[in-house]
Image (spheres, rainbow, N blue to C red):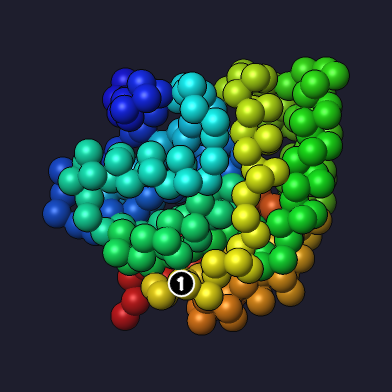
Amino acid sequence: MPYLTPPDNCRLYYTTDNFKADRPAVVLLNGTSQTTIYWEPHAAAFAKHFRVLRYDARAQGKSDIGTRQISAEIHIRDLKKLLAHLGVQKTHLVGISHGAYIALRLAATSPEWVNRLVLCSIGRDSQAYVKQIVQAWLQILQRSDLKTMAWAALPLVFGKRFLNQNQEITAKIVAAVAVRNDKEALMAHFRAVSDYPPPESFVNSIQCPTLVISGSEDPIVNHLDARQLAKDCHGRHRMFPETGHSIPAEAPALFQQVVLDFLNPR
């Protein structure tokens, strides 16, 4: 399995699709408790048009937690080192939730690395509410286990339609979260998120074309807040009907169509 080892010896797992082709690059950035597996259906579709990079950030999936305190800045530093390692000078970023935050932060602080930006399930002013949810999940983990936290998170990270139509697989989703995550690493991730600066403090620095996608049933990020983020980025906003926080999983076909249309402007 391919790993990048930054100077502090924290191994970062990554995987590439169609990377030998002479095409623009796309990076898919995980949300909280997600891994590269989350993006598999989309990586295959995007690889027909782009070089595709997926990776587990520190404290995610197959990557190490490292010895340094996790922060947004360390995540950004890791991503830039990974891009440089793979010879990518500029890329499209497609992120969901936590991954969208890191993508937005990188585009604001290092615009020379970013061509276009796709942000799912993030708003301009939602950070305070997100931190309350993250603190609740942290408290659950401190007193219980990954499965209990995953069950508590389920109605927040998926919309009503998806949960109603997929009741037979919800236990498998919970089991997957428990298997693919490490309790101590996820707790460290939650503590780090609690210290992230809010998007409104840097969003006006965005220079690249930006698409913000929100779900009409997302209980974490209101679509009006997502629309305001797009406005502040001088970008576009698209709301998906009957969709919750986990947009790429809940509306995969529409997600692929909208993102590919945005990344391949005619």
User: Residue placed at 28% from the left, 54% from the top?
Assistant: 25
How packed mark 1 is, by other alpha carbons closer than 10 Å (few <14, some 14-19, many 20 or more), is: many
> Going by the image, does 187 lie left or right of 12?
right
Q: Position of residue 14 (x, y in %)?
A: 36, 32
Q: Is residue 212 above or below residue 69?
A: below
Q: Amino acid at mark 1?
A: Ile
Question: In the picture shown, does residue 209 fall above or below 54?
Answer: below
> In this orientation, which residue lies closer to the viewer: 188 or 229?
188
Quarter occupied by residue 228 = bottom right
Residue drawn at x 34%, y 76% is: 265
User: Along the line of sight, which residue is nearer the eye, 148 or 57?
Assistant: 57
- For residue 151, say whether it is visible: no
Badge 1 marks a residue whose secondary structure is loop
Would you place residue 77 above or below residue 260 in this image? above
User: Where does the image place residue 140, in percent across and percent down from the top left?
Assistant: 83, 27
Which residue is disc 1 drawn over?
Answer: 206
Residue 61 image position (x, y, % from top left)? 52, 26
Q: How many marks?
A: 1
Quadrant position of the N terminus in the picture: top left
